[in-house]
Image (cartoon, grey):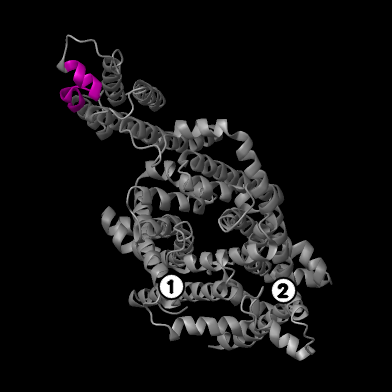
Amino acid sequence: MDSFRDKLVPVTSILAGVVVVWYVFAVILNAPFQRDLDRRANETPGIVEFIGKTMSQPKPTLPAPHQVAVNFFENTFLRSVTSNRSLVYNAWVTLSSTLLGFAFGTALGIVIAVGIVHVATLDRSLMPWIIASQTIPILAVAPMIIVVLAAIGVTGLIPKALISTYLSFFPVAVGTVKGLRSPELTHLDLMHTYNASLSQTFWKLRVPASVPFLFTSMKVAVAASLVGAIVGELPTGAVAGIGAKLLAGAYYSQTIDIWSALVAGSVVAALLVMVVGIAGRLVDRAMGGRPA
Amino acid sequence: MSWLKPSWQAVTAIVLCMIAAVLGAMSAPEAAALAQPASSVDYPYLGTKGLMFGLLVVTALVSMTRIPPVIEAMVLFVGAHWIAWLLISGINGFEGTALAPFFLLLAAAWLLGWRCVSVLSAMLPTSRWAATALRLIIPTIFGAWILIIWEAVTRGAGIPFILLPPPSAIGARIANSLPVLAADVRQTIFKAVIFGYIVGSGAGFLAAIAADRVPFLRRGLLPIGNMVSALPIIGVAPIMVMWFGFDWQSKAAVVIIMTFFPMLVNTVAGLAASGHMERDLMRTYASSYWQTLFKLRLPAAAPFIFNALKINSTLALIGAIVAEFFGTPVVGMGFRISTEVGRMNIDMVWAEIAVAALAGSVFYGVVALFERAVTFWHPSVRGG
């Protein structure tokens, strides 16, 4: 826990610094509009009152942190979870397609990785394309997938999950290939001397060796999958979900809503990565891994 | 039977070919013509049907004899692609009428293509030049077959244009709307992406140097940077659009935020990469912090920095394109994608995606080339 305590003070002080800077910018950025309001109302507030007003505008340019916190708290805990303004409801909509897409993507990535490791033809022909596709802004296809699938009557969860699948399978495939190839030659030779079959080598050597790589790439994949789900919600015209909240906030200039949706998205992302990390550690321990 | 070496792809191809021959008509008009032999209905593959079946069987049989792999690969390459070309050009004017034998022949030709790639990837060329050529040819054939199957299936089965246009239509669309595409690339890439990429990566780099100078900052920034890289930063796009307006400045701002943290985290990791011995050596030379930084630690960090630059090249494009979904002037790649999707001009969307893919690859390629030039001393570049 020593390293944790080492980090705690710097991290909290930097975060506190961010909050302070945020407040300062909130005052500076909201000041022109507030001055305008005051002039029209023929008011000449004192400095303190003026600053207080800049932090309580209904549609500020930059909402102050406490405004975002209040909005986040209200929409998370005080609203019933079935209300479509509830952040829990919207986060759940996004989370469900994220998880579905992540599950598909991980399964697909593992299958492709196993194929690439065992079939030389796939390795030589498919692998370069998988790597090249990393350089392509694939998120750009998201609107098309949504609209085209809607045209043939597929709407709701599946199209968004497909985008998440698409985004999450690349990291998993690449990471798993790396992991399945990570056993050293001496280990493979040892399996040879045991007269192990291909499947025995696979299950007893390659799979255990690939698990740490798999979980590392799954962390990347789950974050990518969430981004895919959020972007997938944009072209549907803001029905439900974190992406829809962002878009609706942008349409109606509800800046506080945008910020609290962002916070909700970040909380979901952090939770997802944490869950995958914990799962990885549990699996590692179940397989007999010892802390280094 | 020493002259024969069976391969499952070739055998399956011949079996598929035989099933196709038994089933008869390749397309609906041909079935109609066969039903009424007296009438002279025009139908596809009037003269080329025999040629295709013959080519397929001959290629499959030749590939199973014991001939040098180079010749085998060449025979398979020519045979498979010739059949594919005949299939695709024959369906011209009869889109959507293909019957089962069309797809069986396509599958058989694909199997021959697969066999060709297998033969090529089993080769162990001695010269370096041949190895490089093979490394390029094998994925190219694979990519070509994706396009061939896409083209043949969309045209043969008559898949509606708005669902999935054939690659040839997308190519035609790219050729016809070059000025529009060029304007979009100029708006999105040359204004938003390049500016945001340079400023964002530069700021991340400077922040990393500052974090390196002040250990307190490093201990605080690194966990935050690691956490932020998992967050959906793309969500700040609507806020940036509100702050900086619809034009490219708001997209550049999104790109700056997205590229900042990968650069920070990677550079900080890279600055720790130089060994203790080397740093001690610099100290015995009585070199200052900045001398050590420029002569030892930055060169040692270069692979990490270039890794961040490569990650950022993709992130920057994604950031700019997605930010345009939230509001933009009437030009730009993200704008074009979202509006043409709304107007159901799916071929234009694919054209834009193809351009984006090309731009992304070129961007990445330029960074990679630059990396090779700068880190020529690194083992992964030297190849030793």
State the residue at coordinates (80%, 72%): B289
Q: Which residues are magenta?
A: B19-34
Q: Position of residue A42 (x, y in %)?
A: 78, 83
Say which quadrant the N terminus of chain B sits in. Answer: top left
Amino acid of disc 2: Asp
* Position of residue A210 measured from the top left corner of the image (x, y, whole percent): 39, 63
Q: Nearer the viewer, mark 2 or mark 1?
A: 1
Residue B119: mark in rendering = none
Query: Nearest the camera: B71 or B181?
Result: B181
Which residue was labeled with disc 2? Answer: B212
Queried whether the magenta region covers residue B26, the answer comes back as yes
Location of residue A103 with respect to B335 vertically, above or below: below
Nearest to the observer: residue B165 or residue B125: B165
Spatial CA distance of label 2 from label 1 is: 37 Å
Residue drawn where x is 31% and y is 22% of the image: B59
Q: Quadrant of residue B68?
A: top left
**Three-letter code for the amino acid on which mark 1 is drawn:** Ala
Circle 2/circle 1 CB separation < 8 Å: no
